[in-house]
Amino acid sequence: MGLYRNSSDEELKQLRAKLFASLHERLTGPTSATVNGRGVQYQQRTDELRTELAAIDAEITRRTGGMRRGPIYIV
C-alpha cells in the first residue's frame, strides 16, 4: 500500500507541484550566505525530494493505468 493511496488526485497534483517547486528552488537557489564577515554554506541534498516526487508520480501513474515498470532496454 502506497503512502499516497488515500489522497485525492487533486491533492497529489498540488503536492507534486509544491515539491517540484521546492526542488527547483533548492537546485537554483544560493548555496551560501555571508553577513558581517560570518558565512554559512548550505547542502543541496535533493534525495528526499526526488524520492517523494517518484512516489507521487508512481501513484498518479497507477491510477491512470500507466506503466508500472520502466522500459526494457536492449543493448
Image (cartoon, rainbow, N blue to C red):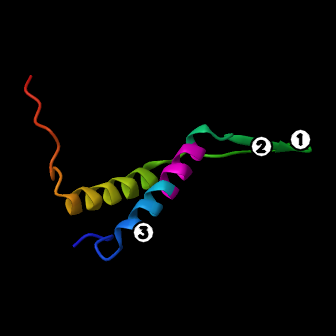
Residue 6 x/y as whole percent: 31, 77
Q: Nearer the viewer, residue 22 or 41?
A: 22
Give above or below for 75 relative to 55: above
Residue 28 x/y as whole percent: 60, 38
Provide the residue span drawn in magenta: 18-26
Residue type (three-letter) at the residue carrying disc 1: Gly
Q: Which is more N-terminal, label 1 or label 3?
A: 3
Q: Residue furthest bottom?
A: 6
Give above or below for 54 relative to 30: below
Answer whether residue 25 is magenta in the image. Answer: yes
Read off the residue under disc 3: 11
Circle 2 or circle 1, nearest the eye:
2
Q: How many marks?
A: 3
Q: Secondary structure at mark 2?
A: strand
| Residue at 20% across, 60% down | 62
Residue type (three-letter) at the residue carrying disc 2: Ala
Q: Nearer the viewer, residue 16 or 34?
A: 16
| Residue at 15% across, 53% down | 68
Q: Which is more N-terminal, label 2 or label 3?
A: 3
Alpha carbon of mark 3 to alpha carbon of mark 2: how far?
34 Å
Alpha carbon of mark 3 to alpha carbon of mark 1: how far?
44 Å
Residue 11 x/y as whole percent: 42, 68
Read off the residue under disc 2: 33
Answer whether residue 7 is magenta in the image. Answer: no
Quarter-of-image position of residue 35:
top right
Q: Quadrant of the N terminus?
A: bottom left
Residue type (three-letter) at the residue carrying disc 3: Glu
Read off the residue under disc 1: 37
Q: Magenta region's main secondary structure?
A: helix
